[in-house]
Amino acid sequence: MQKLIKTSFRDSFIYGLGNISVKVIGFLLIPLYTDPRYFSVDEFGIIALLDISGIVLISLMASGLPQSLMRWYWDDEFRDNQKGIFFMSLSNQVIVSISFCIILIPLAGRFSTLIFGSEGWSNALKILILSTALQAINNIINSLMRIQSKALLFSVANFIKLAVVLILTVYLIVFRQAGVKGIYIAQVAGNLLFIILLSVYVARNCRIFFNLQVFKSMSRYGFPLLISNFAAASLAVIDRYSLNSLALLKYVAIYTMAYKISSVLKLVIVDSIKMAITPMVMQKMNSPDNKRFYSKTLLYSSFVLMLGIITLSLFSYEIIKIISRSAEFWIAFIAVPVLSLSVFFANMRETSSYGLIINKKTNIVGISVIASSVLNIILNIILIPVWNITGAAIATITTQFFYWFLNYYYSQKEYHIPYELKKIAIMFICGGILSFAGLMLNELHIVPRLLIKTACVISFPFILYLFNFYEPVELQAIRGFISKWSRLRNLRDNLRSLKNIQ
């Protein structure tokens, strides 16, 4: 169990480095996007709406294939034909991506009118559709690297892609005056480069194969996930579409700033852990200690995430002032704690749905997310006209809690796992109080303000200790970790030891 947990953290760390690079590049571009010389506040809102439209499109184009690939790749019946399963998934995704481009690109003008009220953004939408189609193909390749635990290759390939996107974006906007279109032209180039870089790796893992019965089984498994992914993507973007319809484009821009800050947690922590853990969940389906592993995965990932939530919420005011070139965005810090805490429930939902995945009850996931999306729409309609961005944030956290509870309830009925909910509740309450403390500290002078906020972050593990949060074996492991990694002269040996974890 300890070796498996160490492997999980090692791979999560490596995936995290790749995901951190995504956020670093995103943060490097925020000053450019908020610079009045290149984009107005309303144009930042336009970029936000285009980005979330891409999220919805990718949920449809991916068509549940990455999840189906991951499930069938480790099926005992197909262990001798894993290359064939990958080939069938990849070739199907290429056909789906091409089909979407053929259908959607001619309709870009209508979509532009529907979203923005004019056809002026149709060219940007066409480029976005092409970029999304390529990204869907990239996702299949990324899934294969995750399945094979190629964490380093995954991170390096994605980092190169993102570096190219960053350089091209800056060049096209600053030197070529390409405006919003330049952002998505750079993304098309980056996605194409990614496919070219990994073409040899892909070819080595392909074997021409097609089995109609297997294809039907994977499709039946993947279709509910397609509905679920689409509904989940819609759930993630309803708030900004609602702000665009019920408030001003300016509020879309301000809310997007808060969302970008809080989404660091989802990308760097939640997604990194998910990338490392999901293949292990499939591998350990029939292991005798799997339920304890699943339970501890939720507890430990929640602990790491809550530390990140507290840190980000407390320092969001300073972060936004540093990265934004316009003072109009500074008010966004008010929504960051609420949106950050909503990520806590998103992680719980991801991690407590293993029973549904193992028993192939993916239709329940789809029903849950559809119900949550309906609730989110209703809450946004009620709250946004009253509280604008704060109302949208409250609607988001309420919906994420509801979404988690539905998945948890039905997952436990299908496959009971003894999660430590009491400890997680203590963690959430203590972390929530510390996260909101920053709202009362921002009027202080910068030096005492930063010192108090830092003390709040450091105090979190010790506050949990007062509630008997840690087991004796966990305290022993923490002491061993501190003792091992505090010896700087052994740093090289300690880093080498990570490579030996199987």
Image (tube, rainbow, N blue to C red):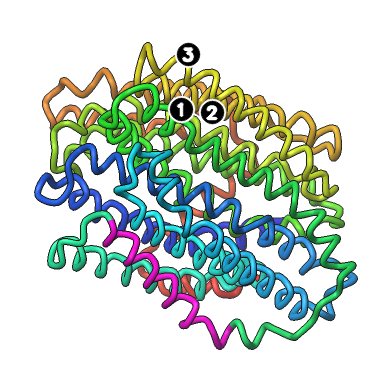
- The local crowd at label 3, few if under 14, some if 14 to 19, many if 20 or more residues have their Cα within 10 Å, is some
- Mark nearer the N terminus (1 vs 3): 3
Q: Main secondary structure of the magenta part?
A: helix
Q: Which residue is mark 3?
A: 382
Q: Is residue 30 above or below residue 310?
A: below
| In magenta stretch: residue 189 | yes
The amino acid sitting under disc 2 is Met
Residue at label 1? 431
Tell me how far mark 2 sits from mark 1, CA to CA. 6 Å
Frontmost residue, 415 versus 182:
182
Residue 60 in picture, x, y percent from top left: 60, 52
Residue 481 lies, in percent from the top left, at: 51, 54
Above/below status of 378 relative to 160: above
Q: Are marks 2 and 3 in contact (CB under 8 Å)?
A: no
- Read off the magenta span: 181-201
Q: Is residue 172 above or below residue 1?
A: below
If the image is split into quadrants, where does the C terminus sit?
bottom right
Per the image, label 1 sits on a secondary structure element best described as helix
